[in-house]
Image (spheres, rainbow, N blue to C red):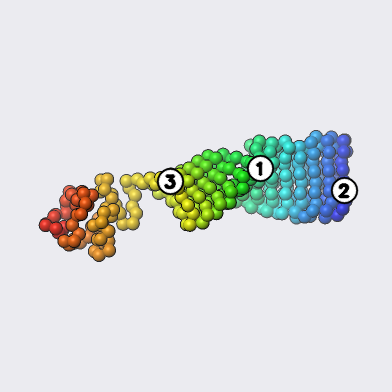
Amino acid sequence: MVGSGGFQIAESAGVAISTTIAGSGVQQVTSGATASATTVSGAAALAFVFSGATGIGATLSKGGFLDVDGGALTSATVKAGALLEVQSSGTMTSAAILSGGFLEMFGPGSAGGVVSSGGTLELFDSGQDMTGLALRAGAVVVVGQGHVASGNISSGITELVENGGIQSGGTILSGGILEIPANGVVSVVTVSSGGKLLVFGGGTDIGASVSAGGTVNVSTGGVDLSASVGSGGVLDAAGGVTVSSLLLGGPGNRSDRRRRLGDHVVGDCPVDRFRRRSRPWRRGGQPERVGRNDRPRSWLCQRHHDRQRRHGIRVRGHRLQR
């Protein structure tokens, strides 16, 4: 056991077996050496696997930290409060990131294994190989400084694009959540049915495409630029800023007691607005009776009344009656 203030170094051809690093203890495994069944436990406990070294079967808990700095780690279990870091082309073959555990990847390097519900994957810089890493529902992905993500956000996954990080392209699938806090940037993302894009204060979304059932929420201080919102999609700017958004609707939409007659939307002309305030509504969205002051006052309203005639409404003077 390496306790507070203790220091262990495994050098060329050296082997450290079943070492426990506790308190403020430190273990270093250098080129040619091997560490097997290492336990790193405690807020200040540190372990390092450097280039050319090998780690086998590490367990991290209670704030323990293990840095795979160019070396190779075959397997590891990362429990709540612990952190496993892979950098400088290091290799992590099979990691189990449990709830409350963290896996950080800086620049080139590879990682395999599973990030379970409540576990967190943090990505910085570029060049990571995560083809062997699976994200379970409830996992969190953090896109940090210098990293550009482009993949999809699957059901049950929450992705945060933080300061200096970028999400470019990709789709937020049903049940997936993409959050943009301060200084995060997301561009050209598709929000599919059941997906959510949340833009918080200081965050920026550019060119999102919102499909039917998809939702974009822009909080106070957030910015959404050039979003395209399809029929059934939702863009909610609750104190945030939206610029040049395109709202697309389909012919079957119903909203605010409106329905389509051909290409004219009942409820859009001044006469219809007057009726909503002063007349009871009958089947088909038409009032029971219309008075003199309700006669058409524009070509659009006249077109509306012409269509009413074709739908079985008779015109008598300035009165319209079934």
Image quarter for residue 73?
Answer: top right
Residue 207 shows in the view? yes
Of the two numbered discs 1 and 2 on the same chain, state the one appearing first in sequence: 2
Mark closest to the chain's N terminus, 1 or 3: 1
Q: Which residue is mark 2?
A: 7
Give me the residue at 69% from left, 45% from top: 104
Q: Are marks 2 and 3 in contact (CB under 8 Å)?
A: no
At a point 63% along the width and 37% down the height, the residue shown is 131
Cα distance, mark 2 to mark 3?
60 Å
Q: Is residue 173 visible?
A: no
* Residue 36, percent from left and from top: 82, 42
Give the amino acid type for the residue marked by disc 2 in the picture.
Phe
Relative horizontal placement of residue 321, taking residue 5 as reference (left or right) = left
Q: Secondary structure at mark 1?
A: strand
Q: CA distance from mark 1 to mark 2?
A: 29 Å
Q: Position of residue 243 (x, y in %)?
A: 45, 48
Quarter of the figure with the C terminus: bottom left
Residue 13: percent from the left, percent from the top?
87, 35
All told, the count of numbered labels is 3
Q: Identify the residue under disc 3.
A: 244
Nearer to the camera, 49 or 265: 265
Q: Disc 2 or disc 3, which is closer to the eye?
A: 3
Left or right, 71 with respect to 159, comes to right
Helix, strand or loop status at disc 3 = loop
Picture quadrant of residue 164:
top right
CB within 8 Å, label 1 to label 3:
no
Distance of mark 1 from mark 3, alpha carbons? 32 Å
Q: Amino acid at mark 3?
A: Ser
76 horizontally vs 120: left or right: right
Dot 2, how many residues are within 10 Å of its Cα: few (below 14), some (14-19), or many (20+)?
some
Secondary structure of the residue carrying tag 2 is: strand
Give the number of the mark in front: 1 or 2: 1
